[in-house]
Amino acid sequence: MARGGGNRSRLLLVLLLVSSLFLITLDLRGVNLAGTFRSGVSTAVSPVENLFSRLFSPIGNFASDIRNFGQSKSKIKELEKQVDLLKSKEVLDEDVIGQLTQLKNVLDLAGRGGYKVVAAKVINRGSSTSFNQTLTIDVGSSDGISRNMTVISDGGLVGVVKSVSSSSAIVLLMSDPTFKIGVRIAGTQSIGVVSGQGGNKYLLQLLDATGEIKVGDTLVARGSEGGRPFVPGVPVGTVTTVQSNASSITQNADVEGISNLDRVGLVAVVVAGPKQDPRDSLIPKPAPTVTVFVTPTPSATN
């Protein structure tokens, strides 16, 4: 009898361990039935746990841990969520730092140009019913924004406001094929028109028959009557290729935009133009060339 009782006890212990391992496997695989099985097994296991608590305390503790496995797993998941939250917060902090840098630079550009601006965050990109290339910003009529206002970034021109609601506005990007702006070659009086081409490359058509286009020329906005839709002096782009065609009445050139429209996250809407034309004062200054002097090492003489 004693031997039979011992065999039954060992059998129950084996069943306990097998059931426990089975539940762990279900939990790790995310099977929802594990909770139901766990409650049933817990009820059946309880007498066995009490029976062996004195002789097999480690086994009893293990069984207790199995009953609480779901709770522990829940705590682990909560910790994982907190870690993910901290990671997302770190990314957000980097994003905020980037936006603050853009804000500082765009306000610096506006200050040097004498523009009164309202800063705005880009909240959407895409086409509208009328234009292919637009972006939506988080300021609108309640912030003093209206149609045909110039939009700038920390580098230069971005586009022009085309439609406004109370809390947002749609900006037509200068890359849109319908976009055109009158420009002037910095340092000269030669004028022309820059047209959007659907990307960061633009077409310049020089209207001055006696003017000359050179690679590296910087273009700035001429400005419109009353500062709308364009205020004067905003950097527009740089000439990359001159298209020489003797039969053409006008001179053409390829232009690269000053602003990288794909990376613009924060802009400023010019709500009031400058008292006087800033002319070429907003053109990015090239980085100074650093001259390195190398002193030859005297060779050893025998």
Image: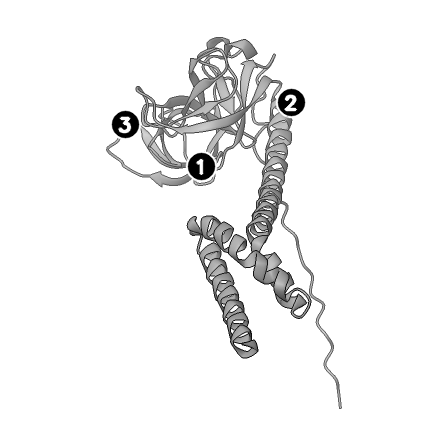
Query: Which mark identifies residue 249?
Result: 3
Q: CA distance from mark 1 to mark 3?
A: 34 Å
Residue picked out by circle 1: 262
- Give x and y (percent) for residue 255: 40, 36
**Where's residue 21, x and y in %?**
49, 64
Q: Which quarter shows the C terminus?
A: bottom right
Q: CA distance from mark 1 to mark 2?
A: 24 Å
The residue closer to the viewer here, 6 or 221, is 6
Residue at left offset 59%, top offset 33%: 99
Quick one: label 1, few (<14), some, or many (20+) residues within 10 Å?
A: few
In the rendered image, which residue does mark 2 sit on? 111
The amino acid marked with disc number 3 is: Ile
Q: Amino acid at mark 1?
A: Asp
For marks 3 and 2, give the one nearer the viewer. Answer: 2
Of the 4 image quadrants, the one containing the N terminus is bottom right
Nearer to the camera, 81 or 231: 81
The colour style of the image is one colour
**Marks 1 and 3, the one that precedes in the sequence:** 3
Q: Is residue 175 left or right of residue 248?
A: right
User: Which of the 4 quarters of the picture holds residue 130?
Assistant: top left
Q: Residue 9: which quarter of the image?
A: bottom right
Residue 41 visible in the current orientation: yes
Give x and y (percent) for residue 108. Answer: 64, 27
Name which of mark 3 and mark 2 comes first in the sequence: 2
